[in-house]
Image: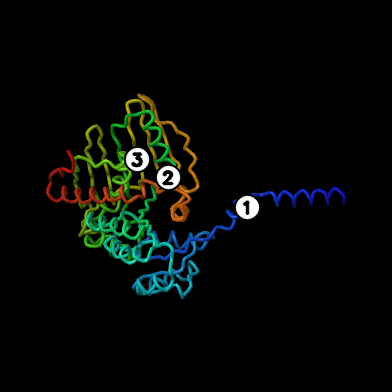
Amino acid sequence: MIKNSVLGLLVSLAVLLIPMSVLADEQVEPLRIAVIGLVHGHVEGVLWQAKDRDDLQIVGIYDPNPELFEKYKDKYALDESWYFDDLEEMLDATKPEAASVMSSIKDHIDAVRACAPRGIHTLIEKPLAISTVDALEMKMLSVKHDVLVLTNYETSWYASVRTAARLAKESGPINRAVFRHGHKGPREIGCSEEFLEWLTDPQENGGGAIVDFGCYGANLMTWLMDNQMPETVTAITRQLKPDVYPDVDDDATIVLGYKDFVGVIQASWAWTHDNKDMDLFTPGASYHASKWDSLTKRDPDSDRKTHPIDDRPEELRNEWTYFRKVIRDECEIDPLSSLENNIIVCIILDAARESARTGQAIQLGD
């Protein structure tokens, strides 16, 4: 009994000595978030995360179609009071800190126009905007109202990508990068009809695979080049399945030319399997980064070998932890999500579409 009493006293004293900051971390103030749009298939990610996490709280959901709210209501335990069919009414009634934008790409600008003057930060599902003109307006609104306008890519959270970039820069110089992104096609993999409706509409998406998956390589290449603009952009698009996707391309190749560097972006809705790969080449080695933690290194005249990945800091483990922390000034803006990077992505995509249309290389820099 005496031993147990002493042990209990020691435990109590140990608890009292725990720094208050540690205890506070266990009671994280949740990020109050609004969801703008239910037509993007990736919206299920934020609905699922909010359902299972204590640090993310949905306070409002906007979509003009109430049937989409009903579609997700029971699956993700959505409260009826969260739904609004008017965006500005939802923002004024719920007063979120931040918004997840899951609309068509064309409607991204409308979300920022509504959120920025109200002091609401936005995380936009890639790419940032349908055009450079819209992207530059977003920049203006961000600066004027002192809010974050960030872009989310799945590849931003791959430890393989970040480790490969570090290794290649250390062993460099990097002289070539190849990006392969895409899958069998949105219809082939079972995307919803509301998703397909805008994803295959050039007025709503800005193109087909050239936008949907071309943006990944443009984002990563711009990051590797520290936001340097390519000198030239050359693109070729094809309709490999015109009966399935009659209005947009389903296969695109974009070549980005820099002074001492070439980037090749292969974006397709016609791969035989899911692709999110990045290859970086240096004189001494090449690095192949695939999904999440898959990384291999290849030395000269050697086979590929699995390479260990770097540990990621907590804020780079997923978009919602990052979004909360960057809003709360607990971490820096990650370059992959930044406006500076993603405005250049929009410039590249505009140039790529023009190149594909004209059959000419587009000159962007000296």
Q: Amino acid at mark 1?
A: Met
Q: Farthest residue to the top: give it.
A: 301
Q: Which of the two residues, 104 or 131, is positioned nearer the viewer here?
A: 131
Picture layout, residue 160 above or below residue 95 = above
Q: Crowdedness of circle 1 by 10 Å Cα count: few (<14), some, many (20+)?
A: few
Q: Amino acid at mark 2?
A: Tyr
Q: Find residue 282 and report its horizontal and vertical position in percent.
A: 33, 29
Foreground mark, 1 or 2, reads 1
Q: Tell me which numbered mark, 2 or 3, is placed earlier along the sequence.
A: 2
Q: Find residue 233 and report its horizontal and vertical position in percent.
A: 19, 43
Q: Looking at the image, which residue is at 30% across and 39% down?
A: 225
Q: Which residue is mark 2?
A: 158
Q: Looking at the image, which residue is at 75% across and 50% down?
A: 11
Element class at badge 1: helix
Q: Find residue 274 and report its horizontal and vertical position in percent.
A: 36, 48
Element class at badge 3: strand
Q: Tell me which numbered mark, 1 or 2, is placed earlier along the sequence.
A: 1
Q: Decide if residue 213 is on the left or right side of residue 310.
A: left
Q: Which of the two residues, 35 or 45, is positioned nearer the viewer here?
A: 35
Q: Which residue is mark 1?
A: 20
Q: Looking at the image, which residue is at 17% across and 38% down?
A: 366
Residue 286 image label: none
Q: Amino acid at mark 3?
A: Met
Q: Decide if residue 255 is on the left or right side of residue 169.
A: left
Q: Which of the two residues, 228 or 254, is positioned nearer the viewer here?
A: 228
Element class at badge 2: loop
Q: Crowdedness of circle 2 by 10 Å Cα count: few (<14), some, many (20+)?
A: many
Q: Which residue is mark 3?
A: 278
